[in-house]
Amino acid sequence: MVSKSYSNLLELVSGEPPPFFGRMTGRIPRIMTVSGLISDVDDDPSESVCSDPSSSVQRDRIIIVANQLPIRAQRKSDTSKGWLFNWEETSLLLQLKDGLGDDEIEVIYVGCLKEEIHPNEQDEVSQILLESFRCVPTFLPPDLFSRYYHGFCKQQLWPLFHYMLPLSPDLGGRFNRSLWQAYVSVNKIFADRIMEVINPEDDFVWVHDYHLMVLPTFLRKRFNRVKLGFFLHSPFPSSEIYKTLPIREEILRALLNSDLIGFHTFDYARHFLSCCSRMLGLSYESKRGYIGLEYYGRTVGIKILPVGIHTGQLQHALSLRETEAKVAELIRQFTDQGRIMLLGVDDMDIFKGISLKLLAMEQLLQQNPEWLGKVVLVQIANPARGRGKDVKEVQAETYSTVKRINETFGKPGYEPVVLIIEPLKFYERIAYYVVAECCLVTAVRDGMNLIPYEYVISRQGNEKLDKVLGLEPSTPKKSILVVSEFIGCSPSLSGAIRVNPWNIDAVADAMNCALEMAEPEKQLRHEKHYKYVSTHDVGYWARSFLMDLERTCRDHVRRRCWGIGFGLGFRVVALDPSFKKLSMENIVSAYKRTTTRAILLDYDGALIPQGSIDKSPSPKCIDILTSLCRDENNKVFIVSARSREKLAEWFSPCEKLGIGAEHGYFLR
Ligand SMILES: O=P(O)(O)OC[C@H]1O[C@H](O[C@H]2O[C@H](CO)[C@@H](O)[C@H](O)[C@H]2O)[C@H](O)[C@@H](O)[C@@H]1O
């Protein structure tokens, strides 16, 4: 399978074998095992972090950094003290690790816990999470967390990256410098935590999503050669939107302190590149499938590859007894009543377009009365993660639209829209996918959205589910997707009916088209999607990103690096060791060959030795400069930080000598 990522395109033309991620040179973390009070992990010794610090096993190590750790924490109920921790199985970050499927790679996570941990318990919790889960928690004071996450992330960055400008105080949040400072402080706290565990020469660091966009600067400042990747899970907006951000350059420059920056789609990458070009004057090169941005001697790679799902986890859920039972229940509730299920699964936030979908359903029923009593839209709505007024408005509009549709088109025993707001278990959601004839994702903006992928795998099902569904094992599977043009998964789903979610007529038509579609066409579309989704899973994505990261960082050790710039303007100037010292021979031969010469000379360290006590030029120096200036083919300049008075005084004998004093602020 050929990836669309740049490294794989390169392999394709070069005929090289695919790169292997994992070098066995990593050092074991500097962690000691300390017994803890509060943990419910399984006791597989291979799971413990360096339980034997003297062990000689060497593994590659990746530090995965994200706003949230893939951990669920629960206060112990039996005592007033202590916590129980479990893996959050549905977290993409945990699936990523599993997807790497390589025991030679050790993964450490850095991030926040969802629960607030009292300062008195933080050391103990840190130790347990490190030993048992290889997780390093970042504890943030509640007020700082709130200003960083609910303030800057969810009210400012997130809306803007989803194309919402704060045109009025009600629409997202206007830029607020103190929230931005909270964001920067939190990013620094994350960097400090990474520094506690990183082995900078060997470890790879992979930072995730828009919550941590300035973190790369803090890490690069501390370790100039750190091997650092960043993946943006959200959309990267068009430069016309992005450039409204007052801290637009700071964020771009911070991202450029990564070695590899990943995006789900070509468009997001293109937007980022045009921001770098328009706001920082940087140009990029695309050569043989590679996209690289030159930034002070470093080449920052751009990776385009949409994330995938954990198909194994989904297949496991499909094989559960509970899933079969739920599928049977849904068949009784819908199919046996002659109903066709259309399905939507979305967070109830402003960008998921739930209301637009409901309006399209209303229109479908108005314009196609033949579907009345036959079609049901099941809308599963997960709670939003933000907490603004906008979320409440979305909820209110959703409830009132559902009520209106059901009152207008419903009849006893038939509700055209079923809205599910209670949290569903994973297997229950899967059962809905299995039964749904069509899945609709009509978000107005979403970074990726993995719901269509989950739907496709679920519709492929398995033999046991075929029996529950009353299908012959040989029956080809079918599924149909209606997908918004404005979401990251859209380009990868070429068999979906693509819609502009704002165009209610078009979405209603798409629903009708899906309902009327001939079976062989549904099968063909399903087959196409199934092939793609099952081969481009989360493991494929993670391996591909890390291979490219390793490739991008391969010559770090050879590079000579200097850090320059203050604050978020910090960057590293990297030089290839092939930079050569200027030889006397070269200078003499160039001088002889040329007839028009500009000769620019530094002063301290160039015309007088760096450590000399007498800083004035020697008579010999004055003689040489005077004779250089005498040649009409030469323009000779001293360029120095020194004051114009001093330079003018020292070089008064050399009349024709040009002087650039105070770094060129004064010119003679
Ligand atoms: O709400 P947040 O805590 O700020 O997180 C933002 C969203 O992150 C995750 O979604 C994003 O990544 C997914 C995987 O790449 C992608 O499918 C989705 O489109 C992105 O928005 C998370 O799944 C969402 O629940 C969060 O809202």
Image: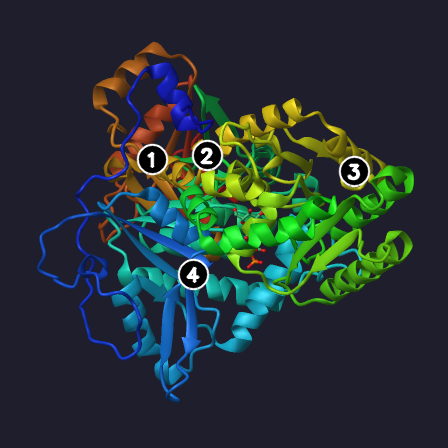
Amino acid marked by disc 1: Met
SS type, badge 3: helix
- Of pointers 1 and 2, the one earlier in the residue sequence: 2
- Of pointers 2 and 3, the one earlier in the residue sequence: 3
Label 2 Cα crowd, 10 Å radius (few <14 / some 14-19 / many 20+):
some
- Quarter of the image for the N terminus: give it: top left
SS type, badge 4: loop
- Residue 364 picture location, percent across and down: 84, 40
**Residue named by callout 3:** 507
In the displayed structure, 367 sits above or below 362; it is above
Label 3 near label 1: C-beta < 8 Å? no
SS type, badge 1: helix
Numbered mark located on residue 547 in the image: 1
Mark pair 1, 4: CA separation: 26 Å
Q: Nearer the viewer, mark 1 or mark 2?
A: 2
**Residue named by callout 4:** 88
In the displayed structure, 307 sits above or below 19; it is below
Q: Residue at x 47, y 39 (%)?
A: 462
Q: Residue at x 84, y 58 (%)?
A: 412
Q: Give the residue at the far top of this rendering.
A: 593
Mark pair 3, 4: CA separation: 35 Å
- Residue 548 picture location, percent across and down: 37, 34
Which of 484 and 643 lies nearest the eye of the viewer? 484
State the image quarter where residue 413 is shown. bottom right
**Residue named by callout 2:** 534
- Residue 269 picture location, percent across and down: 55, 35
Q: Residue at x 12, y 62 (%)?
A: 52
- Of pointers 2 and 4, the one earlier in the residue sequence: 4
In the displayed structure, 632 sits above or below 493; it is above
